[in-house]
Amino acid sequence: MIERYTLPEMASVWSEENKLRKWLEIEILAVEARVERGEVPREALEEIKARAAFDVRRVKEIEESVHHDVIAFLTNVAENVGEASRFIHYGMTSSDILDTGLALQMREAMDLILEEAVALTSTLKTKALECRDVVMVGRTHGVHAEPMVFGQKLALWAFEMARNVQRLRRAREVIGYGKVSGAVGTYAHLDPWVEEYVCERLGLRPAEVSTQVLQRDRHAEYLTALAMTGASLEKFALEVRGLQRTEVREAEEPFRRGQKGSSAMPHKRNPILCERICGLARVLRSNAMAAMENIALWHERDISHSSVERVIIPDSTTLLHYMLVKFHGVVRDLTLYPENMLRNLELTRGLVFSESVLLALVRKGLTREEAYGLVQRNAMQCWSTGKDFQSLLLEDPEVTRHLDREELKACFDLPSHLRNMGRIFERLEDLVI
């Protein structure tokens, strides 16, 4: 991933140094296991532990000749260890360290992602409770529908993020498997106990069965969880973008001191963070699709998945981590304009209470169809003339035959319309992240 969208802690996870360090740890643990089984002299293990090392530049130099990253790594380690290196990688295949090491990196990456996802969810919960009385208009099809509160939007996001946290935790569990079972997973040259020993000490579980590789449905599930979380962030960011439009201006992402919005127009305050999040979510979805393509491999393994994963796994984890951090900042410092929310709520001159009038007429004995016709007739006149909806209803004798002035006025009572919102926030208060 390019530096622009990479935060330092995630860059460390996917560094070459971290990858090779994990490979070495796996190799040494395999030797340890064989010592426990009496297959390797303990002195050899001590020598390996004392001298085993690698140099990233040297590994790259060897790879230029051998065109095989694991062989290059093992060659460099052997240069440092000497004769005892003959016990390293015994009975193992490249994927034993590639896939097991990748699982460790993916778990580390997920830990960083989960930390940010939990933090964002917590902030959304807090902000939602703070905004439980911030009244605004709800929109369907982009058109004013009925009154709501801004806290309801944030509560919706909080619950959705909580579901994403559950999915991400499940993905961490699914990827937390290793294998040390040889060229086609048969343990032909290593006892299965070696695999169990290595995995236990790494905090992984041994795969129940493997081929030369861990099966890629695990990686696809992991990438899909990342993509779904990204899709949620896109959904939230898209809403902020919509509310930031000049004609609406109900909410606005942070605009920092010294920030500039346009090279040509000094007045611009653009939702660049939310637009960036929406764009990057597309990459996550594409990468998840590529991960699904990696599931089907020839027989016990080919390497068509390998080159893909070197791109999509570091990139997807890096991007989602970045997106979570950035959107958390948007939520934390989101600027709200409650006065604009009220202004927009009143923009249609009471039309948002049309259902209340409809149901009041139904309660008076009209059929739904009859009531709908009366209300819609006046609503369309309100749209076309700009007259106040309640006034038009009061001037309609077919309406006032059933509803008097006080009964009509009650249909436009905002607190009554929002009287049941408390139940949503009670559920939110009980949300455990």
Image (cartoon, grey):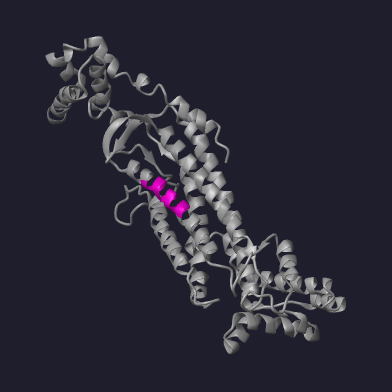
Q: Residue at x 59, y 56 (%)?
A: 172
Q: Position of residue 277 (x, y in %)?
A: 42, 53
Compared with 20, 200 (above or below) is above
> Residue 16 lies in magenta, yes or no?
no
Which segment did they paint magenta?
Answer: 228-238
In the rendered view, does 208 fall on the left or right side of 289?
right
Residue 175 position by quadrant: bottom right
In the rendered view, does 420 fall on the left or right side of 354?
right
> Residue 237 lies in magenta, yes or no?
yes
Magenta segment, principal secondary structure? helix
Q: Is residue 21 among the parts visible in the rendering?
A: yes
Q: Position of residue 422 (x, y in %)?
A: 46, 25
Decide which of 152, 376 is in the foreground and name it. Answer: 376
Q: Residue at x 15, y 29 (%)?
A: 380
Decide which of 2, 152 is in the foreground and name it. Answer: 152
Q: Position of residue 97 (x, y in %)?
A: 65, 73
